[in-house]
Image (cartoon, rainbow, N blue to C red):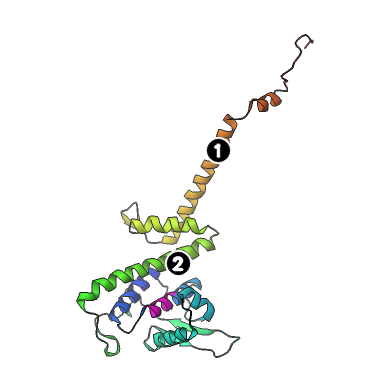
Amino acid sequence: MPDINYIKHLNGVFQQFSKDTRLNPTHISLYLGLFYVWNYNRFPNEFYICREEVMKQSKIGSTTTYHRCIKELSHWKYLNYYPSHNPYKGSKVRLFNFDTSDKQEVNLKSPINGQALVSNINMYKHNTNFIKLEAIAKEKLILSFFKTENWPELEAKKFFNHYQGIGWKVGGKTKIVDWQATARSWMLKADEMNLSVRAQSRTNNQNNLPLDHFQDNLHTTRNKNYNEPL
């Protein structure tokens, strides 16, 4: 499997989703759950899955629904599913690369297995929905990355909301090429800001120390007898 560009891959698969009228939200949610596991494992050719974990990621509560959807996704060539039928060994999955910049481009003009394409009237609505799904997938990846780097979820959400709001561009102009590097820069700036705040706090505390503190340092007392010789 070549290197996967997750943004290009998601763009390609979401475009494919918009053409395929067989899919329902559960199929898409399951695919995103599998994509999350695939990304977490660094995009191997094939990877083992834990049904409970994937169902949790996909928000699927029924094992019957899970098995039906993953078999349909496999049948419709979104992935290959290799069930183990062994309770002590996980099933395997292989996700296909939908990056439309590769030589193996996704055919977006032809219907899948004879399925009619979505009409132009509903296309805008479908595209809007998939843009939202793409944002959800990005946020999940960012939350996972920040967790791996031992950073709090709140900071990950700040990072996502900031760059999502400006279209994933540096300074609102240059498109971000490597979001992980941008996230690490964000962490470094946050560390510098925290150090600055702590330093300022120490300065403020020193400036507001009680009089007794300075008297103790000078070894003086309030009831000194000035008749005593020095």
Q: Which mark is residue 201?
A: 1
Q: Tell me the quadrant of the picture where the N terminus can be found.
A: bottom left
Q: Residue 90 carries which label?
A: none
Residue 30 on the magenta span: yes
- As drawn, which residue projects farthest toward the front? 61
Q: Tell me the quadrant of the picture where the C terminus can be found.
A: top right
Residue 150 point in image, percent of width and height: 55, 59
Magenta highlight: main SS? helix
Residue 50 in view (yes/no) = no
Q: In this view, does 76 lie to the left or right of 42?
A: left
Q: How crowded is mark 1: few (under 14 residues within 10 Å), some or many (20 or more)?
A: few
| Residue type pointed to by label 2 | Lys
| Residue type pointed to by label 1 | Ser
**The one of 20 and 101 positioned closer to us in this rendering:** 20
Q: Which range is magenta? A: 25-32
Label 1: which secondary element: helix
Identify the residue shown where x is 49% and y is 51%.
Answer: 188
| Mark 2 lies on residue | 140
